[in-house]
Image (cartoon, rainbow, N blue to C red):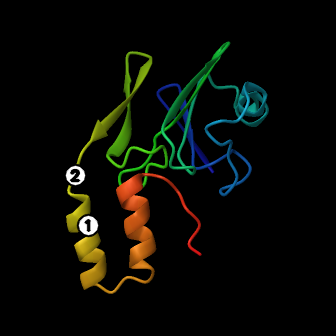
Amino acid sequence: MRLDVAGITLVHASPSDLWRAPLANAPDAEFETVYRPLLSKAVVYAHIHHPLIRRLPGLGVANTGSVSLPYDGDPGSSYLLWTDGEWETRRIDYDIEAEIRMLEERKVPRTSWLASLLRTGKYQPPF
């Protein structure tokens, strides 16, 4: 699934797969292979939770990051801002401990694992 808005193509992960997308450290060639066929000058995706902005010749690719689980080592919320053709990743601190307390109060499964992800801003396998 994809959405084209104001010259930007939005996809969850990649155009052909909702669950596979280039990781933040992927080589430029992988971004080219996945997103160049969209014939868009700007592509935004989200699935990997890692905010990034990659500029390639004639193609910009950005990842929005995540409101509560941006897996780049900074636990603050991240979002992507587009202004006049320029991208910027923005961060907002929020009360992570309050979120963890809410998870505990609601008895969300694997709360201790989720708390670790929230506090560190890094993905860790659950087991």
Q: At x 70% / y 35%, what residue is drawn?
A: 26
73 lies above or below 7: below
Drawn side of residue 82 relative to residue 26, left or right:
left
Where residue 93 appears, as percent x and y from the top left, is 24, 45
Dot 2: within a 10 Å radius of its alpha carbon, few (fewer than 14), some, or many (20 or more) residues?
few
Where residue 117 appears, as percent x and y from the top left, is 43, 61
| Sequence-first tag of 1 and 2 | 2
Query: Circle 2 — which element?
Result: loop
- Amino acid on which the number 2 mark rests in the picture: Tyr
Closer to the camera in the image, 91 or 123: 123
Q: At x 37% / y 82%, what residue is drawn?
A: 108
- Amino acid on which the number 1 mark rests in the picture: Glu
Q: At x 50% / y 49%, what residue is drawn?
A: 49
Please name the residue that numbered disc 2 is placed on. Answer: 94
Do the numbered discs 1 and 2 sit on residues whose CB atoms are within 8 Å? yes
Dot 1: within a 10 Å radius of its alpha carbon, few (fewer than 14), some, or many (20 or more) residues?
some
Q: CA distance from mark 1 to mark 2?
A: 9 Å
Query: Circle 1 — which element?
Result: helix
Closer to the camera in the image, 24 or 8: 24
Where residue 80 appears, as percent x and y from the top left, is 40, 34
12 lies above or below 59: below
User: Quadrant of residue 36 in the image?
Assistant: top right
Q: At x 56% / y 72%, what residue is drawn?
A: 126
Please name the residue that numbered disc 1 is placed on. Answer: 99
Give the number of the disc on residue 38: none
